[in-house]
Structure formats: C-alpha cells, structure tokens
Amino acid sequence: MGTQESRQPRQSQDTYEQGRGTGRRALLGAAVLGAGGAVLGLPGAARADEAKSGESGGESGGGYRSLPVPTVIAHRGASGYRPEHTLGSYQLALDMGAHVIEQDLVPTKDGHLVCRHENDITGTTDVASHPEFAGRKTTKVVDGTSITGWFTEDFTLAELKTLRAKERVPGTRQENTLYDGRWEIPTFEEVLRWADREGRKRGKQVWLHVETKHPTYFRKLGLGLEEPLAKLLRKYNRHKKNSPVFLQSFEPTSMQRMSRLVGTPRVVLLWTPDDRPYDFVEAGDPRTVADLITPEGLAWIASYAQGIGPLLDLIIPKDAKGNLTEPTTLVADAHAKGLILHPYTMRNENSFLPADFRKGTDANAYGDVFGAFKVYFDTGIDGIFTDNPDTGLLAHADFVDD
C-alpha cells in the first residue's frame, strides 16, 4: 500500500518527520488474540458480482464474508516494529493476530514478483553499500515523476537476494533499525509458501492483501504484473472467489485485468479527490477519484471489484488545522453498491494521527490512537490498514465489546 501526491508515485505517507521514535511496544496479550468479531454480511450486489467474477468454488469458511469486522490489515506486515515487507514483519503481524497481511508486488529483471513497497529500493535495502551495483543507480520516470535510485527491474532475482532489507524511516522508528540486515527481500512465492506453512501449523488460513504496484509502467517494460500473479495464485490454489486473498491496485484497469484471470476478491485503491489513476492518465480518461466515489463511479467499480481502499480522508476529511470534521457519505454509498471498504493507513505516531488525537509535542511519540480508531470504526468501515496490528486489534476488541 502506498500513497500519492498528484501525479507522483504514492509515497507521501512515508515522508515521515525525522526524530527519535518513543513509546513502549508490547506484543498483544493472549486474551486479545482470541477476541472474536462480527461476521461480515456481504450485500446482495457483491454476491452477484462474485458469481460472475471468474472461478467458482473455493475453500470452506465463507471467504472474506467470514473475516471479523472491522478487519485489521497489517500494512506491509507489522511495519511499525520491523522493516517492512520482510518475512520478519509478516511473521510478527501474524503472531500478533492480524486478520490479513499486506504485500506490495514489483518485478525483477527476470520476471519474478518480489515484495517491496516501491521498485525504488534505495531506502529499504542496503543496495547503496554494494559497490558491485554502484553502476545500477539511475534516474527513471515512474508514473510521471523523476526518481533517482536503484530499481528492482534492473536486477535479477539472484542479485536482489544478495541485498538485505532495512528500516525505511529510521528517524521516526529508530528502534526498528536494530533489525537492519536481518532479512532479505522475499519473493511473493516465498510468502505464499510461508502462508501455507503457517496456515497448516495454526489450522487456520493466513489471509493476504496483495497490491500490484505501477502496473501500467511495468507493462510498458514488458514486465506485466497480472499474468505472473494469476499464475502464482493458481499454483497455490488461491485463485477462487473464496480464497484467502484480496487483490488491490491504485489502477482500476489492473483489477479489471485480474477479474478476467482469477476469481480472487479485488479492491480498488483511492487517493485524494483530485488524483487521476495513472492508467487513466495514460489512456486519456479524464476521471478523477472524485468521479469514482460518486454513486455512478462506485457502481462502475462494483462491476469488476468487491471493495474499495480509500484514503482515510475520503471517509472523514480534515480541516485546515488537521482536525477531523464530519464523515462523508462514502461508506453508505459504497455499501449501497455492495462494496466493502478497507481504508488506509493508521499509525501510532503523532505525526500520522489527526491533530485532535495527538499527545504532546513530540511528532514521533504515540498519540491517542485508540480514540482515532474508534471514530473511524464508528463510520461503519469494514476494515483498516495499520502499521501497528496489536494496536488495531486492541481497538477492534474495544469496538466489538461496546
């Protein structure tokens, strides 16, 4: 999951304020790990859409209708505590009890899908310290924005495997730098194997939330994401309408393409109202996110997807001071079209919280995150992405016990 400013790659929520992070971080207690939740009742329109979405059948358990609501989705794993998109981050999220764990996918030069938030790996790996790759540093235009760094599509998988992951925002999450160098970049196939292995061990399916990153950009390079992703989903029997996977993308046409390849549930990600998805820019489609969140736009999304993943500001806007205002009608409008909502992203630090939920003056200290969770949960959203799954699960337990 990422974010975007205008036509820039969606990275703005990762422009963290610098400084030393504070706060004690404890694992969730066993009582909360066992907390139950409401069962999602899928509206009839979405059931009809699932029936025409591709593969029929699937695993037992009712698919995503059986997930607790609100669903706690581990954003890039437990990225508040471990370097993101590593098996360490995913494992910690699972051990905490996260209902779903997210992966972002980008390709290698030789066509493997690996888990990175961006194809620019400058900030999330130790590539800059490898003299053998110094000549790979370059400047590219990704989704209309010029970026200088090292990019996954210029490396074979074998070369990427010589690198090690590191904390993206060490100024904010200094504690996480303890784990720099511990894990390599995982392939999505390795994650699927891990999920199957953990599922067998726990007697419970491990749910994934999988994003195709910059699909138009990569397709133009001959590295289309959707076909190899569908192949892997079929190989690991996660291609059906009840499979324990969500697919997601900021480019609607990527989810349209996936709807023709697999039956796996699909989510369209949405940024700010004035944003135009990059596939729309390339195709000359004038629509913006503001158009997509109208009843007509939501009906169009519901013709090929089961949900939306909006920026939290589309659920409850902020005023000029950063305080929350009144909720919009987006939750009700999306539900009326049979769509679930998985907005993003909740983080514990003050710098990421609405101004009215911050505590003290330290941007890296933890604020009143439970208060913010409650306000968002009260809108009726079906799930939420968070860097801190333990916090999200405690908020979930409080909410369902009210």
Image (cartoon, rainbow, N blue to C red):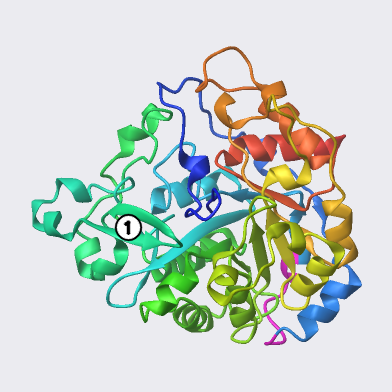
> With 93 as the anchor, is 345 left or right in this view?
right
Q: Residue at x 56, y 27 (%)?
A: 351
Quarter of the rendering occupied by the C terminus: top right
Looking at the picture, does residue 64 appear above or below residue 226? above
Q: Residue at x 82, y 71 (%)?
A: 299
Residue 108, x across and y down, in percent: 31, 70
Kindly identify the amino acid type of the residue bearing the numbered disc 1.
Answer: Ile
Examine the image and state in which quarter residue 260 appears: bottom right
Q: Is residue 57 magenta?
A: yes
**Predominant secondary structure in magenta?**
loop
Q: Is residue 214 magenta?
A: no
Examine the image and state in which quarter residue 141 appears: bottom left
Looking at the picture, does residue 279 appear above or below residue 16? below
Q: Residue at x 68, y 28 (%)?
A: 322
Q: Nearer the viewer, residue 135 or 285?
A: 285
Looking at the picture, does residue 316 appear above or below residue 214? above
Q: Residue at x 42, y 30 (%)?
A: 173
- Tag 1 secondary structure: loop
Looking at the picture, does residue 113 appear above or below residue 124? below
Quarter of the rendering occupied by the N terminus: bottom right
Magenta extent: 54-64
Name the residue carrying label 1: 185
> With 273 as the anchor, is 225 left or right in this view?
left
* Residue 101 seen in render: yes
Counting labels gives: 1
Residue 56, x across and y down, in percent: 72, 87
Q: Nearer the viewer, residue 286 or 175?
A: 286
* Residue 121 seen in render: no
Residue 37, x across and y down, in percent: 79, 49
Q: Residues within 10 Å of mark 1 (few under 14, many from 20)?
A: many
